[in-house]
Image (cartoon, helix red, strand yellow):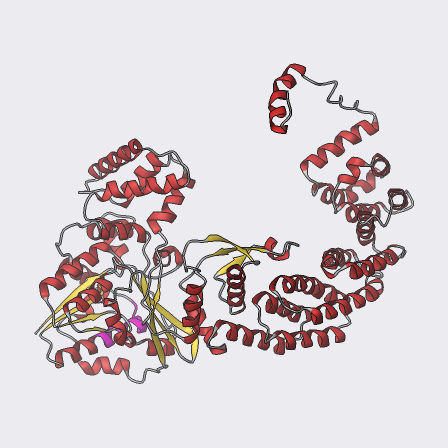
Amino acid sequence: MTTHLLGIRHHGPGSARAVAARLAELEPDVVLIEGPPEADQLVDLAADEGMRPPVALLAYASDDVSRAAFWPFAVFSPEWQALRYAATAGVPVKFCDLPAAHQFALGEERTAPRTDPLAELAAAGGYDDPERWWDDFVESRRGEESAFEVIADAMTALREGDRPDDPHEQRREAYMRNVLRKTRKEGCQRIAVVCGAWHVPALADPLPPAAKDQAVLKGLPKRKVVCTWVPWTHGRLASVTGYGAGVRSPGWYHHLFSTSGDVTTRWLTAVAGVLREEDLPVSTAHVIEAVRLADTLAALRGRSSAGLAEVDAAARAVLCGGDDVQADLVTRRLVVGELLGEVPDRVPQAPLAADLVATARRLRLKREPQARELDLDLRTPGGLDRSRLLHRLHILGIPWGEPELSSVRNKGTFRETWTVCWEPGFEVDLVAAAVHGTTVPAAATAVVREAVAESPSLADITAAVERCLLADLGDALPETLAALDTRAAADADVAHLMTALPPLARATRYGDVRGTDTAQLQEVADRILTRVCAGLPPAVHGIDEEAAAQFCELVDDVHEATDLLGDAARDRWFAALARLSTRDALPPLLAGRIVRLLHDADLLDGAEVELRLSRMLTPGIAPTDGAAYVEGFFSGGALLLVHDERMLHVVDTWLTSIPPEVFSEVLPLLRRTFGAFAGPEKRAIGERAATLSGTRQAEPTPAEDLDETRAAAALPVFATLLGATP
């Protein structure tokens, strides 16, 4: 009876290649792999042709989905190669780590993290980077030679020093030894154990007494656990994501494992391809020189072949021209990569996850790890159904797609733009959302109903109405509208009503596009607008500057909303603004903003506006109040100052009359106002103001400053463009 301990790094092509070769040589009776025993019934799926790494085992507590963990496998993961060997050879395979049922019940109890053993070995070998050391001595090995014995000796030496006890590691290793003892009792003669290199000394013979391990494991709490396979990505294998067993370069490791010859040449050719996709000039000669540089660097460093450090340096210097942005692009696309794995349909799934997979397949919406832009035409059934699915997933807390804010809030009705990117972690979110329903529409409807029942906030209920229409949740809409009407009738806060109105107005637009009857919604919006118009004057009476700024934003939002509610609503709103603009106690900032809105709607002519502006900019008005009025009025843009010389003269006269001792108080407000103008507007105002004050002559007209020779050369081109005869 012999036991072969194959100590590995969890993700590495050298380890994976060595494990595959050693297992083929040993022909074991059984293979034990570090991993959750709950997944033993899923190991046969590794042989399915539809299973394409990277994939991961997902385990979660059935009573608390927040207790979940992933065990990822890439094609270059030694454990995956062990699973594939066992499936091909018909050899039994078991996972031997501490069950997830215990780990979830215990929680995180690591009080004494151990030192990274690779870092210590690298330091002993003169390396300051453990990744580079491992890559040099293990991952870049091309033959079938094995380093298992050497690794075992090194780990034994590392574990002999004084190290703080880690209860979690003690329990894991005690369980592994128990599985090994049980396997031996079952009569297996040749046992292969594939585990992290650190655990090899703990599993080597002679094993400690079984009673000692039983004492460590006695009385451990348990939780019911569900386990399945899910797709994974190379990006989520990267250590930068926070994954504890991650590697810096999943894409490079995949290349090392899957490429049998010309590793450097093929890699740098792929780098050139990435750069050419971005229309960057990379020639075949560049690739040849990059290969030569990588090989030369490897020779200078005493390496048998170029590793990642050499090909990265060569790509950066030759193909990227030293440009960090291009080098970062190569790192994202190739060195890390975003390959998404696949799992077969027969993998057990929660009903909600299965419904999403079926719906996405019907809508031809591929789950891809790369972020991409998705334009949807809501006039087509396919575009509308895709939009509904993405909005429903948002309600469930699964942001597969993020809508562009402009596509949601603008006045266009038939187009939505999303940025879609699938994250493997959404698999856990799907499990968590499954408590609400077995299909995506049913689960989203339940979430909206719960939110409406539990939320006393008018803004939250309004947002729920908007989500119902966007996601086409007709079953939840009537009760949500009823809750909105009831809550709006009981809310006396005008600011709350003004906050609630814009989403309702947008929702009426969504209803028109999506074929939803919004008559009841229109009625609620009209009632809210009526209350806003009646309650706004007392609400803004005597408020301070901060409150005035908040009400300016609310007025702007309601103003835009009335455009979507129809002419009657807009007329009612302008009548309320006209009455409000005549009140003496109105804060200057808000007064200026309201006058500008009325002027832009042609309800106040230029003469009346200049009169009101002049009154606010007289010596009898505090300069700070005048500056606030100017800020409110011109926050809509500076074109009035550019085109109306009389208005510019009023502002100019006021500015020059501000006493020097007060000017420093007014300056921040003025900078905030005029600093928001576009560059061309500021230049035009400056030129007009200089002319107005007599410090500069007016610019010559184009006719006076015309280069007739250059103009004549352009005339034939313009004639051709206009279809005229020169």
User: Can residue 214 be seen in the rendering of this structure?
Assistant: yes
Q: Is residue 175 magenta?
A: yes
User: Can residue 112 be seen in the rendering of this structure?
Assistant: no
State left or right for residue 65 relative to residue 385. Answer: left
Write the residue at 33% across / 58% down: 246
What residue occupies the far top of the structure in this picture?
709
Quarter occupied by the C terminus: top right
Write the residue at 63% across / 62% down: 510
State left or right for residue 319 relative to residue 519. Answer: left
Rendering quarter of residue 481: bottom right
Looking at this view, is 233 or 605 the one in front?
Answer: 605
Looking at this view, is 164 or 499 the one in front?
Answer: 499
Q: Is residue 555 magenta?
A: no
Q: State the image coordinates of residue 252 (x, y, percent, origin top left).
A: 29, 49
State left or right for residue 597 relative to residue 272. Answer: right
Q: State the image coordinates of residue 702 (x, y, percent, origin top left).
A: 73, 22
Q: Does 79 appear above or below 475? A: above
Q: State the image coordinates of residue 332 (x, y, percent, origin top left).
A: 38, 48
Write the residue at 23% across / 52% down: 258
Q: State the image coordinates of residue 398 (x, y, percent, origin top left).
A: 49, 66
Q: Does 223 appear above or below 517? A: below
Figure disc tally: 0
Q: Does 209 appear above or below 676? A: below
Query: Which contiguous range is marked in magenta?
Result: 164-176
Rendering quarter of residue 118: bottom left
Determine the main secondary structure of the stretch shown in magenta.
Answer: helix
What residue occupies the far bottom of the structure in this picture?
219
Quarter occupied by the N terminus: bottom left
